[in-house]
Amino acid sequence: MHQVQAHMLKRERQAFIMKQVNLHNRALSADLGAMLNVSEDTIRRDLNELADAGELIKVHGGALSKSYHYDYTPSSTYALSEKTIIAKKAATLIEDGMYVMIGGGTTVRELVRALPQDLKATFFTISLTTALQLCDHSNVEVIFLGGKLVKNSQISVGGEVISRMNDISADLCILGTNSIDVDEGITDSDLEAVQVKKAMIKASKRTAIVTISEKLGSTQRLRVCELNDIDFLVTELSPDSPQFNNYVQSGVIIL
């Protein structure tokens, strides 16, 4: 009896871990342990099992979503239908001749797929995956802002990248986010990623955050920016959804 219950608990625990990893792209062992009220050793064993099963990527201190990987198959993207809707909406913000600063992640991947083939624009990106994907658009100029490459997420970080951004004045910055909340703003769990995202926003006249609505009201430990620092919020929901009542007051345009 106890064995069955323990097995059920483990299955539920691992399902919860996968949900957190897929939703926020990464999860820290310490945070997962606190949320589930189990030891970090238990979490570590769970992460090892899930990694061995090919469900996630185990990294120091936690885990990453497999969607970070360049050979990832879009069909297994978490909330793909929602991200497709977001991509089509966000694509309308990009016009011919624009300078666009763009990040990485599965929602951005769908956005690049939704861009018109004849679009003529210049894209600056810190994401190797995004840069390679943009190469499929013959009229688009792609500028990869290279620096120290974070192997798992394939984004470049560090002072070299940030100093290059200081010389750029982009029309629009498009970023995915790990978490977004009315009071806490845009938050993340990775310090190097936060510093690069801050620089991307600073180097752009306007900023659009693309995210599934499931992330609304969630927070991580590190702040990227306040809610009133962004211009557009793009989710799969209709702009008149009651979930946006408090967001509109901060001056954000809901697409």
Image (cartoon, rainbow, N blue to C red):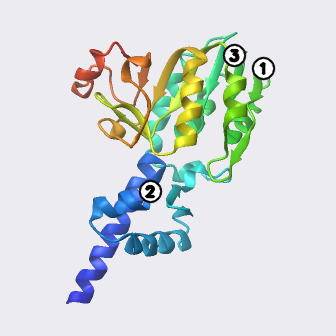
Amino acid marked by disc 3: Ile
| Residue depicted at 41% across the width and 36% down the height | 187
Q: Earlier in the sequence, mark 1 or mark 2?
A: 2
| Disc 1 packing (10 Å; few <14; some 14–19; many ≥20) | some
Q: Secondary structure at mark 1?
A: loop
In the figure, 212 relative to 102: above or below?
Answer: below
Q: Residues within 10 Å of mark 2 (few under 14, many from 20)?
A: some
Task: Check disc 2 and report the residue beneath it.
Answer: 28
* On-image quarter of the N terminus: bottom left
Q: Is residue 157 above or below residue 235?
A: below
Residue under label 1, please give it.
139
Residue 100 x %, y %: 64, 19
Pinpoint residue 123: horizontal percent, then vertical percent: 70, 23
Is residue 117 toward the left or the right of residue 254 in the image? right
Which element is circle 3 on?
Answer: loop
Give me the C-alpha separation between circle 1 and circle 2: 40 Å
Q: CA distance from mark 3 to mark 1?
A: 20 Å
Inspect the image, locate mark 1, and give the three-letter code of the amino acid beneath it. Asn
C-alpha separation, residue under disc 3 versus residue under disc 2: 33 Å
Residue 168 shows which numbered tag? 3
Q: Is residue 105 visible?
A: no
**The furthest residue to the front:** 159
